[in-house]
Image: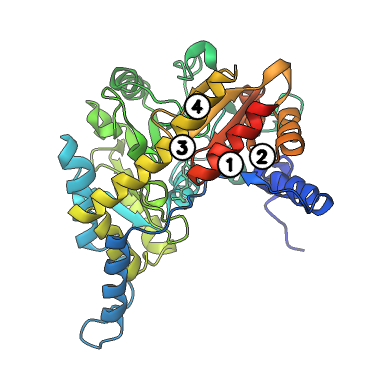
Amino acid sequence: MYKINDNYLKLPGSYLFSTIGKKVAAYSAAHPDKTIIRLGIGDVTQPLAPAIISAMHKAVDEMGEAATFRGYAPDLGYEFLRSAIARGDYASRGADIQADEIFVSDGAKCDSGNIQEIFGLDNRIAVCDPVYPVYVDTNAMAGRTGEYDPKTQRWSNVIYMPCTAENGFAPELPQETPDLIYLCFPNNPTGSAITKEQLQAWVDYANRAGAVIIYDAAYEAYISEENVPHTIYECEGARTCAIELKSFSKNAGFTGVRLGYTVIPKDLKCGDVSLHSLWARRHGTKYNGAPYIIQRAGEAVYSKEGRQQLARQVETYMYNARTIREGLEAAGYKVYGGVNAPYIWLKTPGGMTSWEFFDYLLEQANVVGTPGSGFGPSGEGYFRLTAFGSYENSVEALKRIRKL
Ligand code: PLP
């Protein structure tokens, strides 16, 4: 008789967004006359920029001609895109990352879930709490996280690093030494960022401890403050301890198009084994490359027109963020984030739990957000709103919340 991977059975409840979806569907069915504003899931709403659309059209036409048709893409990504990324995201910031250290993929979710495969099962992970749930869940599926305690909402073999208002949402160096450290800045869900000095302290720590930092920079495009690093490779020594994950979803609206990449510097080694070659082996075996048309779309992100058009999109979202943040502050809420990230993280009023506030907002204001506790135990008592809606919806949601 076959056996299943029973690590899956240890995973707690259903995924956060499916619970939200069910609650919203039940409310809508009972109140068909109400207009619900969704500021919950972090999906973008603006259409693809014209520079990207025209690059895609051109690539589609190429695929229709024998002379320019492309079949399987190189496993690791087309040279034109890897070079554009190396120039646009690294050389331009003085970071030493070469095109052949970049692995193109279909998004950061897959990479952030798959990257753990190249590490031993006895490695101990450290995560920020609250955090993007994929890091812990994928390690749990692999059997690396021990047992789950529903009371504390913690896994026995995970090092949690609380990020709360008390520490400015910046994790402190852990007491116990982890092997893999997941950091995400600007952060989902708290919307916080850390300074270059703070990140340098993590890089120094990882190098000292012999740990690897898996640095998720999916929201890099939203950084507005000077001393916030755009890539971990701005820090000295990061080439020997850090893997960086990037996504085209939030800077270029590719949530439905799908494109991302992972950087593994060739200096990152466990003894004499290069992590770069392990990931190349894994990628080459399990992945057949992001589509040509999409990689051409990705290349257009780095063109002059693409950059200008995307900067305007980011500005639009960040204008929403500012509007929501300032509006909530004026209404007496304690609000964080929304400066270097499209997420606003607020303290629930009157000691309500995150889910109580979710229900309250859904029922009284018909606004959907995301309960902070869904991202980890230290998210309890907080609530996330996103700036990815339209300006009109952001203003309307704010008006309704303020009326409460
Ligand atoms: N990493 C973080 C922190 C995210 O919040 C998200 C999406 O919300 C992703 C990765 C996933 O990005 P992608 O759309 O490229 O899979």
Q: Is residue 244 left or right of residue 36?
A: left
C-alpha distance separating marks 3 and 1: 11 Å
User: Upstream in the sequence, badge 3 or badge 1?
Assistant: 1
Check whether the beta carbons of the residues at disc 4 and disc 2 lie within 8 A of each other.
Answer: no
Check whether the beta carbons of the residues at disc 2 and disc 1 lie within 8 A of each other.
Answer: yes
- The residue shown at (44%, 30%) is 322
Q: Amino acid at mark 2?
A: Val
User: Upstream in the sequence, badge 4 or badge 2?
Assistant: 4
User: Upstream in the sequence, badge 2 or badge 1?
Assistant: 1
Residue on which disc 3 sits: 320
Which residue is nearer to you in this view: 346 or 173? 346
Q: What SS does tag 4 mark?
A: helix
Q: Quadrant of residue 223?
A: top left
Q: Is residue 307 left or right of residue 42?
A: left
Q: Position of residue 145 (x, y in %)?
A: 61, 35
Q: What SS does tag 2 mark?
A: strand
Residue on which disc 2 sits: 367
Q: Amino acid at mark 4?
A: Arg
Which residue is nearer to you in this view: 365 or 266? 365
Q: What SS does tag 1 mark?
A: loop
Q: Amino acid at mark 1?
A: Leu
Position above or below: 125 against 59: above
